[in-house]
Amino acid sequence: MQVKGLKEAMGHQRNLDPDCLFCRWIRAGKAVETLGTVAAFNDGYPVTAGHLLIVPLRHTADGFSMTAQEVCDSEALIRTLSEKISRSDLSVTGFNIGMNIGESAGQTVFHAHIHLIPRRDGDCANPKGGVRGVIDGKRCY
Ligand code: AMP
Ligand code: ZN
């Protein structure tokens, strides 16, 4: 995917934290796509091929501290990206979308982000329950 709106995105690069991984990705122009106040990056340890992270273009700790505009832009970017992925990779038959908020919930990078995880028929033995799998043994019901 091509980097789009990079110039516009630069305008949102305020309050970046040099100690934060995602701030460094923003500064280094590693976004695969941007929309207004947010950008998408490839996850370095993808759960499935095409796993993306949707990230505000300013340092803020977690999903609850995202502004209404960042939430709105994220939703639009997720829709655009999921359509692109589905069109370009016909093996993709579903998605998981989710946020880990707080260390107890599994958050490891404290710069807000939304996971967009493409899913394919047969990519695991039994997909039933999806994001319920955040607690070991509770995914299937
Ligand atoms: P979370 O656990 O929700 O905070 O998600 C953080 C995401 O960042 C994970 O999906 C990781 O794969 C990704 N990640 C963490 N550290 C690195 C790194 N050094 N390089 C690339 N991706 C990373
Ligand atoms: Zn940051």
Image: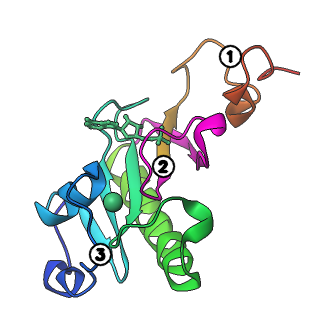
Q: Quadrant location of ligand 2? A: bottom left
Residue lying at 41% horizontally and 45% vertically, measured from the top left: 109
Q: Nearer the viewer, residue 113 or 95?
A: 113
Residue at the image position 56 percent from the left and 17 percent from the top = 124
Pointer 2 local density, CA inside 10 Å: few below 14, some 14–19, many at least 20 = many
Place of residue 116 in the rendered image (x, y in percent of width and height, measured from the top left): 48, 49
Question: Do we see residue 28 in this rendering?
Answer: yes
> Does residue 135 appear to the left or right of 107 in the view shown?
right
Q: Quadrant of the C terminus?
A: top right
Q: Residues within 10 Å of mark 3 (few under 14, many from 20)?
A: few
Mark 2 lies on residue: 116
In the picture, the disc for residue 126 is 1
Q: Please provide the residue range marked out in magenta.
A: 90-114
Label 1 CB sits under 8 Å from any ligand 1 atom: no
Q: Nearer the viewer, mark 2 or mark 3?
A: 3
Disc on the earlier residue, 1 or 2: 2
Circles 1, 2 touching at the beta carbon (< 8 Å): no
Q: CA distance from mark 3 to mark 1?
A: 43 Å
Look at the numbered disc 2 and give the secondary structure of its residue.
Answer: strand
Q: Nearer the viewer, residue 115 or 129?
A: 115
Camera-near label (3 vs 1) is 3
Is the shortest distance between ligand 2 and the CB of mark 3 under 8 Å?
Answer: no
